[in-house]
Image (cartoon, rainbow, N blue to C red):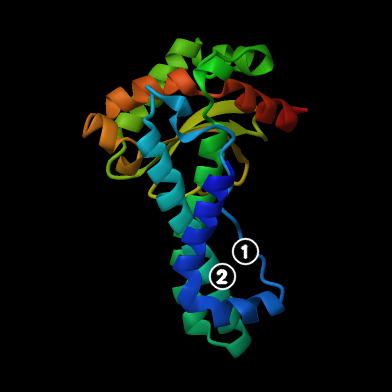
């Protein structure tokens, strides 16, 4: 874990190296940046469902890049606001949404996964299990629906199991690119998200996204999803 953290910090420092003066000024004004989260399991712990190589690249390259670019955009935004540069403020919104969304989505994704030896893949029980049966008919029907919507999603994006906290109802939603679930509605809470960008599966599954979707359920962390569900409806 320590080596992974050190490598991640090195990646971020290299990515932000050219922006250090800007970062220092932003920090002095109290701009809050984000950090690449550690994983609670080793890169190879999800095999054979997801290879260790994919997990390493996904976490240390792709997620690290979203973190670096989001922090850079925040610092540039702070500088633009300080200068009263409205054009620059508007121009930065796309980078903030894309990279910030990438960080938010991946931070959830890592928690949604768990090695089989630690309970990954065990179906949901308790209140979430009952809600799935009520809203989808069965756990198998939910999996089939998420797989179908994830496979049909054109280009890159995410498929989500969401809780509408106002309606107290479970939904399946998709989002494009790195749009977080909140872009589909402020009342939607992500319980489980599956990354269907090619970087999440291509090295192992090539262009056969349905095989990736079928296998990722073997390492799904339903305990985490259930805890989020119960905290929201409490």
Residue appearing at x 57%, y 74% in the figure: 75
Circle nearer the N terminus (1, 2): 1
Q: Position of residue 105 (x, y in %)?
A: 51, 45
Instruction: Give the distance between the C-alpha atoms of the residues marked 1 and 2, in whole angstroms.
Output: 7 Å
Q: Quadrant of the C terminus?
A: top right
Residue appearing at x 48%, y 81% in the figure: 88
**Against 134, is 63 above or below?**
below
Outermost residue toward the left in this view:
207
Is the residue marked by circle 1 packed among few (<14), some (14-19), or many (20+) residues within 10 Å? some
In the picture, measured across the screen, residue 75 lies left or right of residue 90, that is right
**Against 11, is 231 above or below?**
above
On residue 202, which mark appears? none
Answer yes or no: is residue 183 visible. yes
Question: Which residue was labeled with disc 2?
Answer: 74
Q: Position of residue 178 (x, y in %)?
A: 43, 50
Residue appearing at x 56%, y 11% in the figure: 133
In the picture, measured across the screen, residue 67 lies left or right of residue 34, that is left
Pointers 1 and 2 in contact (CB under 8 A)?
yes
On residue 33, which mark appears? 1
Residue 156 occupies quadrant? top left
**Against 87, is 100 above or below?**
above
Is the residue marked by circle 2 packed among few (<14), some (14-19), or many (20+) residues within 10 Å? many
Residue appearing at x 50%, y 23% in the figure: 220
Q: Position of residue 221 (x, y in %)?
A: 56, 24
Q: Position of residue 39 (x, y in %)?
A: 56, 39
Q: Nearer the viewer, residue 60 or 120?
A: 60
């Amino acid at each position: 874990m320590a080596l992974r953290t050190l490598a991640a910090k090195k990646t971020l420092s290299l990515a932000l190296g050219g922006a250090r003066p800007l970062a220092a000024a932003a920090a002095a004004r109290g701009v809050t940046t984000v950090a690449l989260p550690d994983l609670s399991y080793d890169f190879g712990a999800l095999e054979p469902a997801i290879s260790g190589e994919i997990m390493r690249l996904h976490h240390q390259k792709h997620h690290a890049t979203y973190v670096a670019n989001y922090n850079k955009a925040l610092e540039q935004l702070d500088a633009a606001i300080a200068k009263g540069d409205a054009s620059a403020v508007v121009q930065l919104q796309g980078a903030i949404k894309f990279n910030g969304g990438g960080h938010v989505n991946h931070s959830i994704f890592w928690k949604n996964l768990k090695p089989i030896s630690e309970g990954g893949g065990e179906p949901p029980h308790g209140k979430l299990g009952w809600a799935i049966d009520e809203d989808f008919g069965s756990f198998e029907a939910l999996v089939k629906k998420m797989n179908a919507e994830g496979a049909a999603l054109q280009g890159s994006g995410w498929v989500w199991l969401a809780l509408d906290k106002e309606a107290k109802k479970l939904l399946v939603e998709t989002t494009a690119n790195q749009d977080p679930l909140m872009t589909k509605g402020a009342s939607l809470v992500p319980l489980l998200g599956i990354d269907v960008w090619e970087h999440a599966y291509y090295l192992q599954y090539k262009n056969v996204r349905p095989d990736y979707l079928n296998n990722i359920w073997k390492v799904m962390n339903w305990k985490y999803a259930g805890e989020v569900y119960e905290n929201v409806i409490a």
